[in-house]
Structures are given as C-alpha cells and as structure tokens.
Image: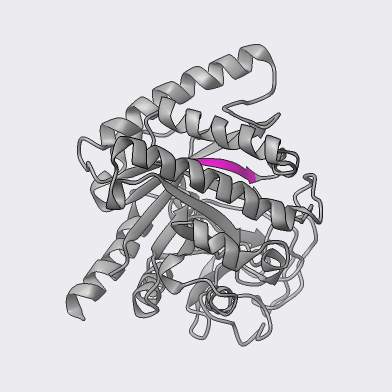
Amino acid sequence: MPRIFLAYLATWQAYDIAQIPAEKLTHLCYAFAQVVNNRIEICQSGTLEADLQAASRSKTIFAELHRLKLRNPDLKLLISLGGWSADGFSDAALTAASRAELADSAITFMLENQLDGIDVDWEYPSNDMAGIKARPEDKQNFSLLLEALRERLDAQSNREGRLGMQRYQLSIAAGAGQYYLDGVEIERVAKVCDFINMMTYDFYNGWATRAGHHANLFNSLTDPDGDSADKAIRLFLAGGVPREKLVLGCPLYGRSLKGVGAEGLGATGRAGTNGAPGFWKIVTEILPNKRYTRHWDAAACVPWLFDGDEFISYEDCESIAEKGRYAVKQGLAGVMFWELSEDHEMQLLDALYDSIYGYIDKA
C-alpha cells in the first residue's frame, strides 16, 4: 500500500487552510523557505519591512497548519526549501563549513516551527537552467549536503526518542529526466532520503513551441521519444533508486499554447504565448466555454483541450486516477501534487485518493 499522499501548498496564494482535507493527507509541504547566505529564511522582496511581514505571515500559516493535526495527528508537516529559480544552494553546499551552517539553520527552523522534516527543492544541482548559480562540484556537494541534513535529523530524532514514522524525515523534489540524473549522484542521494518527490510534469513547459502533454503518464504516439512519468520512473529505477522511495508527481494546473495548427496535439504553436491555468480556472472558466473540445490521448492517458487555436494540456479526474492506479501497481512510495490551492473543491485530490485506496480495496 502506498504510504505517502503528499500535498505542496504555495503559501503566497490566499488560501483557507482550514478547508484542507487533512484526514486524507500523510504529508504537507510548506512552499517555500529560501537559502540566504547559508541560512534558511522566509523572505519576499528583500526589504526589511516586507521580510518582517513575510515572517509574521509564516508564523500564522504554521499555526493554522498545526491545527490540521488536531484532525489528523499522523499528518507530517515539512518545510520545503528552494523552488524554481531559488538561488543560494550551490554556495551553501560548497564547503563543509557552509553545509554545516545550512544544515544547522534548517534544523533550527524545523524545530522552532515544530515541523516533522525537511524537503529540499534545489532546481537543479549542477544545472543553471533556472538562472541560478551552478557548479560541476554541485553533483558531489548535493550528496554531502543531504548527508549533513540526514545526520542532524537522525541525531535530533535520537535525542527525542522518536521511533519509526515519528522520526524526522528528509525528502527532495527531483526533476523527472536524464538532465537531473546527470547532475546528481542519485543512488547516494536516495540512501539518505526517506523519499523522492518526482516532478513528473512540465514536460512541455512555459518555453514550449509545440503542443505536447505536460504531464503524460505514458508516451504519446505523437511524441514516442519524449518524456513521460513512466519513463522518468524507469530512469530512476535504473539509476538505483528503490521504487519504495519514489513518489509520483501530479500537477493541479495546465500548460497552454496559442497559434497551434488545426491538428492540435503535436503541432507547432506561437512562441511566447504559453500559459499555466490552474485546474480551478479550467473547471470554472475554460471548460464551460463551449468553443473548447476535450480530447483523450489513450496511449498517454491524459486529456487535452483545443479550440482551433489554443491547445491546453492538463490533468483531470480521469487522468489523475490513472496515475494513482499506476503508483499502486508499480509499488511506489506514493503520490504528491503541486499544488493544493490550484484544485477546485478538491476534485483532483479526491479522484487521486479514491483511485489509490479504492484500487487497494478492490485488489
């Protein structure tokens, strides 16, 4: 049975935390804290006033998140460090002294906010595609940084007498492709992580100029050599990661492209017209607009929308249920999704949950 049903929550969005279905979640990641001068901070613009406001708001959010534990005492609250274009990691991981400073700061932050673990979202070690500093040494230094965190988390668990699932946890968010594996020592990384959150989405992203699926479970016939969630899982397994540490990622948002030719899927679009509509917008604004037609790619197990010009790749209840059943069949650690506030009345969350636990009940 999958042991992880994890949600990321983007805390820059206005969101009623009380409505989160805590009973269904095993883990909830607060996104994000940043690495600033080898230390963990909650910051916004960098001005003192804005940063103080951000810190105060984060305390309120943490208090609200802890109230969820009254409904589900087993819920694990993690702080997620980094995110897309978040810098500071390469410098912090560079030396033993800087790694120790960052690890100590992360543990202090975790304990001060009464959290259950740390999720490292460095996008990506050894890779500057997000406009961050990157070095070839990141490959080894990433492992060393995670090992420093693991050592401190275990020591703290031992001091508190935490056993089993109560021990402090360490996870990472990983890019779902060979480009990521080329920049890390994945087998060494996996040994110190409790689990790895696979970002199996954005295969066609905000720079795409061709209409393709951004979160397909399997390869589409229109793109047989492209990326897919299944291909990413198989890559990580071949790299030595145990399947019971792999968490399959699902997006609660779509990717769009305009100027697409009449054939839709697989056609070239107009550069710079990319969008990322959340599922709530797709449900409340786009789907009710009768000019869009829904299509289903049976090979890839995902839907797409098309109005003759704009192509939208997205996740719906049918496709996300396929991913849940896949995670069960493959014996994966579980599933995660980015990110909770994009869901509309928890439709996708419920479909994913039911596909996993309903499948198990019937098996």
> Mainly helix, strand or loop, the magenta region?
strand
The image quadrant where one finds the C terminus is bottom left
Visible residue check, residue 287: no
| Quarter assignment of residue 259 | bottom right
Locate residue 281 relative to residue 103 in the image: left or right. left
Q: Position of residue 224 (x, y in %)?
A: 65, 86
Visible residue check, residue 95: yes
Q: Position of residue 239 (x, y in %)?
A: 60, 75
Q: How many marks?
A: 0
Judge whether 342 appears above or below 244 on screen. Answer: above
The image quadrant where one finds the N terminus is bottom left
The stretch drawn in magenta includes residue 82:
yes
Locate residue 93 relative to residue 240 in the image: left or right. right
| Quarter assignment of residue 272 | bottom right
Q: At 55% across and 79% down in the image, what residue appears?
A: 234
Locate residue 8 relative to residue 225 in the image: left or right. left
Q: At 22% across and 43% down in the image, what residue appears?
A: 72
Q: At 36% across and 49% down in the image, what residue appears?
A: 27
Q: Between residues 75 and 186, which one lies in front from this camera angle?
A: 186
Q: Position of residue 20 (x, y in %)?
A: 31, 42
Judge whether 329 appears above or below 252 on screen. Answer: below
> How was this image coloured?
one colour
The stretch drawn in magenta includes residue 207:
no
Q: Between residues 352 and 268, which one lies in front from this camera angle?
A: 352
Judge whether 212 appears above or below 29 on screen. Answer: below
Q: At 55% across and 65% down in the image, what residue appears?
A: 200
The residues colored magenta run 79-83
Locate residue 245 relative to residue 160 in the image: left or right. right
Q: Between residues 346 and 46, which one lies in front from this camera angle?
A: 46
